[in-house]
Amino acid sequence: MIDGLPYRQVGEPVRGRIVCVADHASNFVPDDIELGVPPELLDTHIAVDIGTEGIADRMARRHGVPAHIACISRLVCDLHRNPDEASAVPTSSDGHLIPGNIGANIEGRIERFHKPYHDALGQWLDAAQPELIVALHSFTPQLETKPLEKRPWEVALLYNHDDSAAQHAMRLFREEGLEVGDNQPYSGKQLNATMDRHAEAHGRRYLTIEIRQDLIATEVDQARWAALITDVANRLALALKGV
């Protein structure tokens, strides 16, 4: 965290262009919060969307797509949940108990992390009026609690009511030779809190991308995907002008 803020912003938005949002980019846990989990779990998907920080940062610094990036672990406060949901401060994740969150001051966590993150994101987007928001996430090939349910895609798309960007993006990613489809085992109908609030509620076009985490675990892979996603987003923005 920088100056106690649960986010950082990289790059200056150009009004009417593309921006990037990464809700689960960090595994940081403040010193005054004890989650009660083994330290090695903080390097897994239950604590952070592996690879997304590197992609978002590179998109901003190298490809002109400014980014709003989370600086707090989803186990401390899940910024990609509505503040009144129990999962905003999770007591378990993919079969792992988070004992330090049982009986936690949920209102305090929301006020300290969730509210300033989304207040700043809302102001940032209001000023930018972007033509497209790229929301970055990553996923495991299968969940620990459902090891037999393979998640078949290399790239998966989530959307709620507005699927205009997602449908175009599926085609563009397939043209790159990637296995792509609607996200499983959950869709944007169930999990779309940030884009419901900041995109769909304002009529803004958005693209929520889930990338298989083993494909973006290294800096080299993150650089390659940053270039690829930027290219797809630029082509997508052009396609959407005619929709």
Image (cartoon, grey):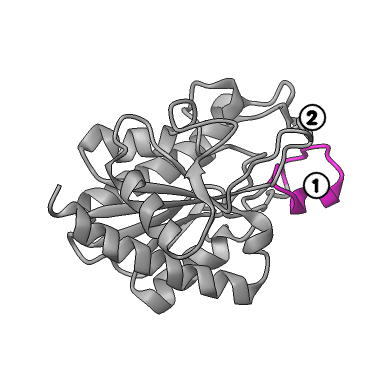
Residue under the image location 51 percent in, 68 percent down: 225
Residue type, mark 2 in image: Gly
Q: Is residue 39 magenta?
A: yes
Span shown in magenta: 32-47
Residue under the image location 84 percent in, 51 percent down: 40
Residue type, mark 1 in image: Leu
Residue under the image location 66 percent in, 29 percent down: 90
Image height check: is 118 above or below 218?
above
Q: Is residue 156 left or right of residue 134?
A: right
Residue under the image location 76 percent in, 54 percent down: 43
Give 90 or 100, whichever is nearer the viewer. 90
Q: Is residue 76 left or right of residue 169?
A: right
Q: Main secondary structure of the magenta part?
A: loop
Q: Is residue 21 visible to us here?
A: yes
Percent x, y of residue 159:
39, 36
SS type, badge 1? helix
Corner quadrant of residue 14: bottom left
Image height check: is 167 above or below 12?
above
Viewer-nearest of discs 1 and 2: 2
Image height check: is 189 above or below 194?
above
* Residue at mark 1: 41
Give 133 or 104, whichever is nearer the viewer. 133
Question: Residue pushed farthest left?
Answer: 242
Asked whether the residues under the numbered discs 1 and 2 touch, taking CB atoms below 8 Å apart as contact, a structural biologist would say no
